[in-house]
Image (cartoon, rainbow, N blue to C red):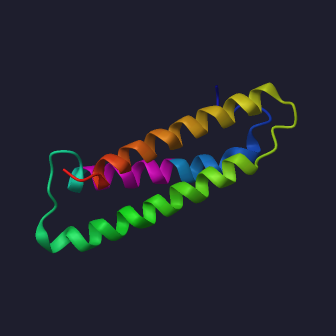
Amino acid sequence: ASLAGPGCGVLAPLVEEAEALTERVGELERLAGPGRVAPVALRGMVTQRLLSTNERLTLQMIKINAVDAGGGDELRAAKRELTRRMDELCARTARMTAPE
């Protein structure tokens, strides 16, 4: 599904936020991803960023769910794709916060 297709303009701000969240999760994975331990001096910051990222992901999912697809197949497919991407980001952040 194309997130930029006709009728999907309502998702544009959500797509932008999804891209920003994807970048943030990638940055956090470089510091605290599976098998990595953030330097002691950065652990508090990493923990705080993980918390704020999880909050942003939750708000993003709520906003995606609030979009009315209005019977449009393309918009419904785009919403599903965006939801799938956010689910993957949630799983990636969960791996960073899971106890070793």
Say which quarter of the image contains residue 92. Answer: top left
Say which quarter of the image contains residue 34. Answer: top left
Q: Is most of the magenta stretch helix, strand or loop?
A: helix
In magenta segment, residue 22 = yes
First to last magenta residue range = 19-29
Describe residue 23's horizontal placement relative to residue 33 as left or right: right
Residue drawn at (52%, 43%) of the image: 86
Residue drawn at (48%, 53%) of the image: 20
- Residue 79: image x %, image y %? 68, 37
Describe residue 67's horizontal placement relative to residue 20 as left or right: right
Residue drawn at (14%, 74%) of the image: 41
- Residue 56: image x %, image y %? 52, 60
- Residue 26: image x %, image y %? 33, 48
In the depicted view, which residue is nearer to us: 53 or 97?
97
Residue drawn at (82%, 44%) of the image: 68
- Residue 74: image x %, image y %? 75, 27
